[in-house]
Image (cartoon, helix red, strand yellow):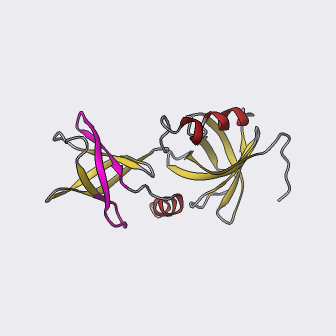
Amino acid sequence: MEDRRQSVRHAAVNRVAKFRLGSGREELCQLRDISAEGMRAEVYLALQPGAAIQIELLTAHVAAGHVRWAANKEIGVAFNEPIPAAAMLAHCSFENNAANSRPPRLRVDLRGLFRLGAEAKVVSIGNISQAGLQIAAPTPLRIGEACSIALPHLPARAAAICWWREGHAGLMLNEPFDYPTFAQWRASFP
């Protein structure tokens, strides 16, 4: 593939970002490199050239564009307008902002099996990331309490309740998903 970028390409290996398709579906991608005009990323969802896409970096900066090419689980994206790539990458550095950063969250409409002690019940999941998820929890839950969550087609994972308010709870997974496992699992849903 011929490189047609006009500005410097910044390596962004292993940085996870969220992308949103025109249909509203949200997924994760792993950035490989980025410039003011576009980016290259690894994806686990089949995307077609021309598809409208929005990329959201960890800092919540959003860049709109379209898929320019797709091959071997990678895509090239051309942005609609140039972005300040270097500044955005510096701002979302995990090393500099580790205490304030959290993995990108995806809005979902899933069910999972929530287990707290001897009690197990099916719960609605409203959003999910590699490190945690939000569930419907009409009854107050104790922060810090150990629990587990089984997601469709995945074994149960140990977690802890990190917040509860207004009928919802946040669970932090004891062992976050690695990107390939999470992305492949998400790609299995229509």
Residue 39: percent from left, percent from top = 71, 47
Relative to 67, say whether 184 is above or below: below
Residue 155: percent from left, percent from top = 34, 67
Q: Residue at x 26, y 40 (%)?
A: 168
Relative to 70, say whether 107 is above or below: above
- Give the left or right position of residue 42, taking residue 186 as reference: right
Does the rendering let one see residue 49? no
Q: Residue at x 45, y 44 (%)?
A: 105
Q: Residue at x 71, y 36 (%)?
A: 85
Observer-nearest of 133 and 102:
102
Observer-nearest of 63 and 171:
171
Quadrant in the rendering for residue 152: bottom left
Residue 108: percent from left, percent from top = 40, 49
Residue 64 highlighted magenta (yes or no): no
Observer-nearest of 94 and 180:
94
Residue 171 highlighted magenta (yes or no): yes
Does the rendering let one see residue 69? yes
Q: Residue furthest left?
A: 118
Magenta stretch, main secondary structure class = strand
- Give the left or right position of residue 188, taking residue 33 as reference: left
Residue 21: percent from left, percent from top = 56, 47
Q: Which residues are magenta?
A: 149-174
Quadrant including the N terminus: bottom right
Q: Residue at x 72, y 36 (%)?
A: 86
Q: How many marks?
A: 0
- Give the left or right position of residue 69, taking residue 133 as reference: right
